[in-house]
Amino acid sequence: METAIAPIPSIRVQDFDNQELNLMDKYAGKQLLIIIYNNQCLGCTGRAIPLAYEYQQEYDNLQVIGIHSIFNKLPVTEEDIKSIFTSGELPFPIYLDQEHKVYDQFNAEGTPQWLLITADGNLYRSIFGSQLGAQNRLMYALDALCNEA
């Protein structure tokens, strides 16, 4: 699903200390590429997370953020999240989406779901998937968004 520009008042997530925060406040004034993903999703960990990292390196005016959506009642720790990275470190900020509320907020079609958000807090695009077609749509949307600024 690709979405027209729409304002986003809040994106509420938890950090690894279970403190709730609003990403729209924390990253106000920045262009955002948010990846809603799950560690159990092979397309997320094998294609989408590395692609998100590449975009973080490529676009100086873009902040990449990961949101791990939790679909069961099992607790997820920082170590669980870091376990998918060979370095053992987070490549960009990652937050927790307890009870998949952010996933539902954006009517995600599955994981990974990409959200591109303008510096003034509007949803620019929402794109599902990690395969080539989704990667191309994401690349064109990022080029348009980041080169407008």
Image (spheres, helix red, strand yellow):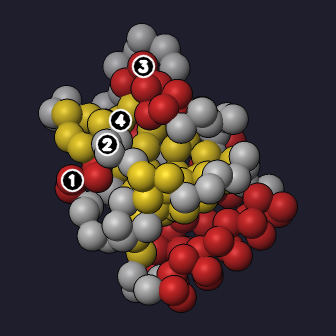
Real-space Cα distance between discs 2 and 1? 8 Å
Q: Residue at x 37, y 24 (%)?
A: 98
Q: Earlier in the sequence, mark 2 or mark 1?
A: 2
Q: Amino acid at mark 3?
A: Glu
Where residue 13 appears, as percent x and y from the top left, is 30, 36
Q: Establish if 71 lies above or below 105.
A: above
Real-space Cα distance between discs 1 and 4? 16 Å
| Residue 79 vs residue 31, the one in the foreground | 31
Disc 3 vs disc 1: Cβ atoms closer than 8 Å? no
**Label 3: which secondary element:** helix
Q: Earlier in the sequence, mark 1 or mark 4?
A: 1
Where residue 33 appears, as percent x and y from the top left, is 48, 62
**Label 2: which secondary element:** loop
Indicate which disc residue 99 carries: 3
Quadrant (top left, top right, bottom left, bottom right) of the C terminus: bottom left
For label 2, the crowd category at 10 Å Cα-Cα, with few meaning under 14, some 14 to 19 and many 20 or more, is some
Regarding residue 49, the answer to whether it shows in the image is no
Regarding residue 57, the answer to whether it shows in the image is yes
Q: Amino acid at mark 2?
A: Ser
Give the number of the mark in front: 2 or 3. 2
Task: Say left or right for 65 vs 51.
Answer: left
Q: Amino acid at mark 4?
A: Leu
